[in-house]
Image (tube, rainbow, N blue to C red):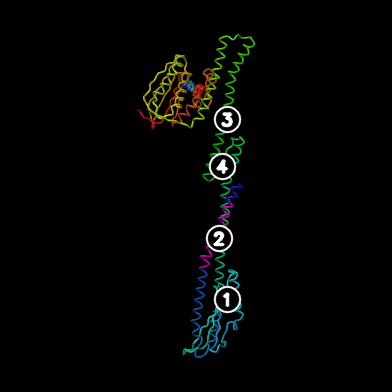
Amino acid sequence: MDYKTKSINGKIIKAFTIIMLLTIVSIKIFVAMTFENRFRKYVDDSNKAELEHLIFDLKSVYKYNSWDIETIKVLGEDAIRKGIALEIYDENKKIVWSIFEDEKALSNETLNEIRKNMQSIDNTWNNQFNEYEITVYDDNGNVAGYSYIGHYESTYYMKNDMEFFRGMNKVIIIIAIISIGSIIIISFIISKSISNPISKVSKMAKDIERGNYKDSIDYKSNIDEVDELINSINKLGYELSDQENLRKRLTTDIAHELRTPLTSIKGHLDLIIAGIWEPSKERLISINEEVSRITNLVEGLRNLAKFDSEKNKLEKEKINIKELITNIAYNYEVKALEKNIKIDYDLEDIYIYIDKKQFSQVIINLLSNAIKYTNSNGNIKIKSYIEDYSVNISIKDNGIGIPKKDINYIFERFYRVDESRSKETGGIGVGLTISKSIVALHGGDIIVNSEIDKGAEFIIKLPIKKVTTN
Ligand code: ADP
């Protein structure tokens, strides 16, 4: 398909030109239908009234058996100024008085001017002349003669009618020019107010396409939809920039995390191959620990990828929180026992609609952190209870705790309190990020209370409306 694109400016100006033409045509039709027609009718009526007056006045032009030439002259001159020609004949059809003889110049000039004026405003105007014969009677009722009255058949305007008509047309033309001017100015302002921000958005989109996410559009239009578009593109830019930073950090972190154990493994193996070190059990155990660190790292990345791809698919079912937690915790007791950590339970029978698989991951993450970050002979307490319109699940340990400066960041991706801690524990800083996101998907939140060297308490809070106790 041959498809031509056009700029917004072009489109808006084209649309407004069409509106403008339609406006002109409608003004023209409106004027013709209302003003011109009414004015024509008004002129026709007043011309008719003049004619009737004249006919009435002509009754008194023959008195005492003679023609009153003075009156005829006054009536005739007055009539020609209103576009009516008058001639008087006696009963033998002999001319008594004629405007064409007595006022030849005035009559020609007047009739020519009417014709010229009318043809200038209507070139279809017909200059046919209508003539009427009116019998004039003497005082005894006998025929004294005839008056002939003539005027143009089509509507005709006299000088002052013409002035009024032209004046009105001028006003209409001025109104049309003002409307057209306003339409042009408004269309220009509207097209600019739409196209300016859109071209900024499109430039920003191109920048984003080229990988430059940093800039944002600092522009406030007075159109809601355009502002929304600007906000969205700014947000898109920020998010892509965030993603880009995250991706860079992730690559660096992974490279770093992999390099450390791999360097250590390679170092061990090089020395063993060179025969400097014996492949003793201790050496192999050390290599195995490094391999375990790599395995942990890969497992963490796998969980993150899995969560990212599944985060929009919650499959909720009615779950007994007490059963879910005890089942998970029993599996982790072995790990706790290795460090001689005691786990206490204080769980209520609470039923809640949650995605069992994803929610289990949250409990596993918090519980394994509690075990990881609690020293030997420590203590962990898991509690579930309803409070403040939410179901709360608390996992509290008396471990190493979290420094104040780090508390606000521990839920961020790849954030670890310090390198040395996680080196020992093998964490990569994604467990809490995933946990918080899963709880957020359920409409809840995780809060944390902690003091360094005293321990940490993570509380999962879920809104109460989905809770039942049976
Ligand atoms: P990691 O895989 O490193 O454990 P997390 O996202 O689970 O990542 O935790 C982020 C950081 O929060 C950890 O590196 C750790 O320093 C701190 N942290 C998490 N849980 C606890 C806890 N129970 N006690 C002390 N510190 C904790």
User: x, y (%) of residue 387?
Assistant: 38, 28
Kindly report the distance in space between the C-alpha atoms of the residues bearing marks 2 and 3. 60 Å
Residue range (magenta): 13-37
Whether residue 6 is situated above or below residue 259 in the rendered picture: below
Which circle's residue, 2 or 1, is located before the other in the chain?
A: 2
- Residue toward you, 211 or 174: 211
Task: Characterize the local packing of mark 1: few (<14), some (14-19) or many (20 or more) Cα atoms within 10 angstroms.
Answer: few
Kindly report the distance in space between the C-alpha atoms of the residues bearing marks 3 and 4. 26 Å
Kindly report the distance in space between the C-alpha atoms of the residues bearing marks 3 and 1. 91 Å
Look at mark 4 in the image and give the residue it sits on: 219
Q: Secondary structure at mark 2?
A: helix
Whether residue 85 appears in this view of the structure is: yes
Task: Characterize the local packing of mark 2: few (<14), some (14-19) or many (20 or more) Cα atoms within 10 angstroms.
Answer: few
Question: Which quarter of the figure has residue 255?
Answer: top right
Q: Secondary structure at mark 4?
A: loop
Look at mark 1 in the image and give the residue it sits on: 128
Q: Is residue 264 magenta?
A: no
- Residue 245's tag is 3
User: x, y (%) of residue 185?
Assistant: 58, 53
Viewer-nearest of discs 2 and 3: 2
| Kind of residue at disc 4 | Tyr
Left or right: 328 as drawn, with respect to 237: left
Q: CB atoms at circles 2 and 4 under 8 Å apart?
A: no
